[in-house]
Amino acid sequence: MKRILIKNCRIVNEGKIYESDILVEGKFISKIESSIKINKLPCKILDAEGNYLIPGIIDDQVHFREPGLTHKGNIFSESRAAVAGGITSYFEMPNTVPNTTTIQRLDEKFEIAKNTSLANYSFMFGGTNSNLSEILKNDINDIPAVKLFLGSSTGNMLVDNLKSIENIFQNVNIPIAVHCEDEKTIKNNLINYYEKYGEDIPIQFHPEIRSEEACYISSSMAVNLAKKYNTRLHVFHLSTAKELELFNNNFPLKNKMITSEVCIHHLTFTDADYKIHGPKIKWNPAIKTGTDKEALWKAINNDLVDVIATDHAPHTFSEKLNPYTKCPSGGPLVQHSLVSVLEGFHDRKISLEKIVEKMCHNPSILFDIDKRGFIREGYYADLVLFDLNNTWKVTKENLFYKCNWSPFENKIFKSKIIFTIVNGNIVYRNGKINDSEMGMKIRFNR
């Protein structure tokens, strides 16, 4: 059995920071003690040298583009970038081509990931206006959630029939994850700007087209439906202060029926950054004001927001250079998710304990993940070691994304990931990827 002994690490886990050793045997954490002596050989010994060890990050929202859009990225390329960023598990979205809206398409993606994903994987099942019967065929322990696009997306994924939406909320007994933007509001806003500028609308108007109002109308509808039908709802990528009114922190996380997420880009950039980064930071929902950004940080710390994720969504750079109406929204983020949030720690916006809670523990709790998201004996050995004070610069040469660009290019980060372990296998260490073993299908305990 393969053994790894990690010595002299500062573990950040379950609200505490403490010094300890960790013994990994096979795929699992077998022992956590202040000083471990190994009697069984062989054993690989890693000296953490006082650096910080956390559970592997669970990213609950990524777009890895396979099948059908693999010129942008694929499960192999983007999972390599993910483990380099400390992400050991991910949930991939259904708006691939074809969409993941049937059991057959879901099984095809599981088969691809089995052979090519370096991180642990699962796939959200897409809801449409007409596939409720197919949704209900799913094994509830196989998928994290049903994903509804209440704003437009790739293919036949826009769910805009109220009766269909209500039927899904009423009948689905696993979490429903939603992209909330009101399509009618967006279309009306777009017409106004198109009449003035044509196709080449200046990028700084993106948050006025995909506006606060569009977000709030859709989010409030979803929350109201969840309350009406007692549905387990998870609202993706909040971008506005106003939407925070819809959530509360009066319950322990495990008892919350309505939860929410905020993404890296909404915590990093503001509308002032469109002048600097242009279409590189065009996302849906749009990046909004500095006031919204600060409100989102506050909501993370007071537990109105439950999860920090990426919404990693790569496009080729040439696609991002298209005029506004043809420029796709989204960008690559998984490789820089942890280090970007650690910038928040350096700026005294968030503690290390809270980072681990929002990026590791809470996704595990909210989606009932089996034996991941915590550093505990008997849990899978998904671990990340980082140096809190080791500056480095993002360049094209150190990117793992297939699209080979990043909104963080030339950014100097203060912290650096040293290694990432997935199921007891060292998949990333000091800038190098080990792709000799693949990740595992995530299981859910429901």
Image (spheres, grey):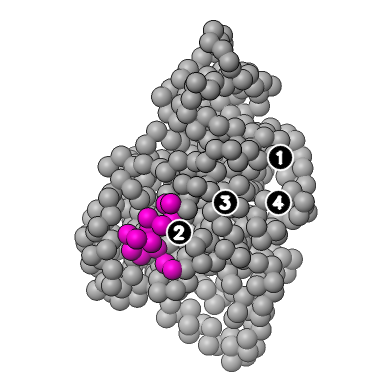
Nearer to me, 43 or 82: 43
Residue 295 visible (yes or no): no
Tag 3 residue: 76
| Outermost residue, bottom side | 195
Above or below: residue 310 compared with residue 22: below
Q: Amino acid at mark 4?
A: Leu
Badge 2 local density, few (<14 within 10 Å), some, or many (20+)?
Answer: many
Instruction: State the image coordinates of residue 400 (x, y, percent, origin top left).
Output: 67, 51
Which of discs 4 and 3 lies nearer the camera? The answer is 3
Instruction: State the image coordinates of residue 301 (x, y, percent, origin top left).
Output: 50, 43
Nearer to me, 315 or 356: 315
Whole-number angstrom distance, CA of label 2 to CA of label 1: 27 Å
Badge 4 local density, few (<14 within 10 Å), some, or many (20+)?
Answer: some
Residue at image x 45%, y 59%? 93
**Label at residue 205:** none
Provide the residue span drawn in magenta: 98-111
Q: Main secondary structure of the magenta part?
A: helix
Whole-number angstrom distance, CA of label 4 to CA of label 2: 22 Å
Tag 4 residue: 399
Whole-number angstrom distance, CA of label 4 to CA of label 1: 10 Å
Q: Is residue 366 left or right of residue 51?
A: left
Tag 2 residue: 93
Q: Amino acid at mark 1?
A: Gly
